Image (cartoon, rainbow, N blue to C red):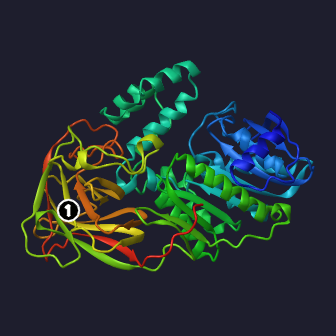
Amino acid sequence: MPGRLVARLAAAALRLPVTRLGPVRATRGIPVRARDGVVLRTDHYAPHRASAPAVLIRTPYGRGGPLPLLGRLLAARGRHAVIQSCRGTGGSGGTFAPLVHERDDGVDTLDWLRRQPWWSGAFGMFGVSYQGFAQWALAADAGEELRAMVAVVTASATRDSTYAGESFALDTVLTWAELLHAQTVPWLARQWELKRGQPRLAAALAHLPLADADRVATGVRIPFFQEWLRHHTPEAAYWRERVFADRVARVRAPVVMVTGWHDIFLPAQLDDYATLRATGARPRLVIGPWTHGSPGLFVAALREGLTWLDEHLDGPLDDEPPRRAAPVRLHVGGPGGGWRDLPDWPPPTVGTAWHLHPGGELAVRPPVASTADGFRYDPADPTPSLGGPLLVAQRAGPVDNRQVEARPDVLTYTSAPLVEPVEVIGPVRAELHVRSELPHLDVFVRLCDVDRRGRSWNVCDGLVRVTPERFPTDSSGVLRVPVTLWPTAYRFATGHRLRVQVAGGAHPRWARNPGTGEPLGTAVTLRAGWRQVLSGPAHPSALLLPIVHSAPALPPI
């Protein structure tokens, strides 16, 4: 199918302007040489006009799949699309070491761009997930030639997402390691493994010690997985050259961020937004009802991203006036929710404490004297994770939690049916007062929406790993544990109920806590223990919600 026709069909499907789409010339496998001699294989989709802005995409996932379509679409709209495989992937030389070479390889690629006869002196970047990490690695050093960035479900720093709550995001990291390795195996072998439901990966997620899990999943040792098991402490020097958060404030290019409420990198991406806002920049932020791999996310990202590039690279196509979109557009989940336009994130809210009460009740009234609620957590039978922010879209997002809530190692606190809607938009946190038989434990908190049929749908959650050094007990042996949940935008409808879950883990999304304090990668001894959650006036355990007044819904994005 001719490239121009492909671009027109794609533009029509995305509801983009279809006029003035020109012919495209594709050149594949161009050798771009890095400073150390490594060849980075690169595809170039050229537009009909010789001198035009470029759009750079650097990826570890190969240059096939949807990328040729995106390259043709960009070129048909008058951009030089440059799609490059990161070193050690997609035919590029060298060895892939996550985050290590992206800054230098990005700078070398930019130098190559400057030496091309079609270079116009301006470029933008587009990237999803790891492609976005590669953007942030280069952005601060790109100078004024960088005119626009499109950052989709990504962030400048991955360390805090990898060790959310100072635990370990086992499902995300091991699944990603297996995904990268799968690119090196024959296609038929990969399809057979997927058809069987990836039993090797499932076995690896349940395996101890974690230092052997990569071999169980893939049959080989994966260096970065081993390194991430070893260098997990906040002060680890290992991460200094692998995070780019301290460079975000130096970026002057306009940035559009697209993400979802159930994305694995959402908190870190909102940190990047806050950093840019603190410099006086006006990034655009779009948050939808999406997971890391939702099809709707990528459609929205293409529409937002192409419009952003049109506006900031050399003005919009087709002589359209510049758009006047609100800086923030987000989707409010739940019945009666919908899209909202906001001037900034987070919006003004009223912080409201929903206290844990005796008998599993959740209410805004002050706590009363009560006995502690307790449960026994056994890492040999870890509390399972259901839905939420996961790498694989098919298992992520909202699910009915009744199965896990029926377990004896999960406490639930439920409000009375609401007499009017409650709308929550912004950061969510909990503060629990806990007494534990063991000094090493995890505290997991999840907010759910219980509908009129009794189904319990997860809205947001968070986990904290407790160690004696980080959380000393008071004189009565009680720990005060603050838990930061994923931010959210959600409308709890009339007749629905709010529910808070408290558990000792969510495996395999987070690695189980063995209860022994053994090193992350080598722990094999599992100790079960009792936990108590206190909720009286002296220990007012509560969920803190940012409440907003209702606003009219907007048309879909």
Res. 220 visible in picture: no
Report which residue position mark 1 lands on: 413
Q: Quadrant of the N terminus?
A: top right
Is 142 left or right of 193, judged from the image as shown? right
| Along the viewing direction, whichever of 290 and 183 lies nearer the viewer | 290
Q: Quadrant of the C terminus?
A: bottom right
Is 125 left or right of 363, judged from the image as shown? right
Q: Position of residue 295 (x, y in %)?
A: 56, 46
Q: Position of residue 282 (x, y in %)?
A: 64, 73
Tell me which residue sits at (36%, 62%) in the image. Answer: 485
Residue 218 location, quadrant: top left
Q: Position of residue 248 (x, y in %)?
A: 61, 64
Residue 366 location, quadrant: bottom left
Element carrying mark 1: strand
Q: Is residue 517 above or below residue 445?
A: above
Amino acid at the residue labelled 1? Tyr
Q: Position of residue 329 (x, y in %)?
A: 57, 67
Tell me which residue sits at (48%, 58%) in the image. Answer: 266
Res. 89 visible in picture: yes
| Along the viewing direction, whichever of 386 and 375 lies nearer the viewer | 386
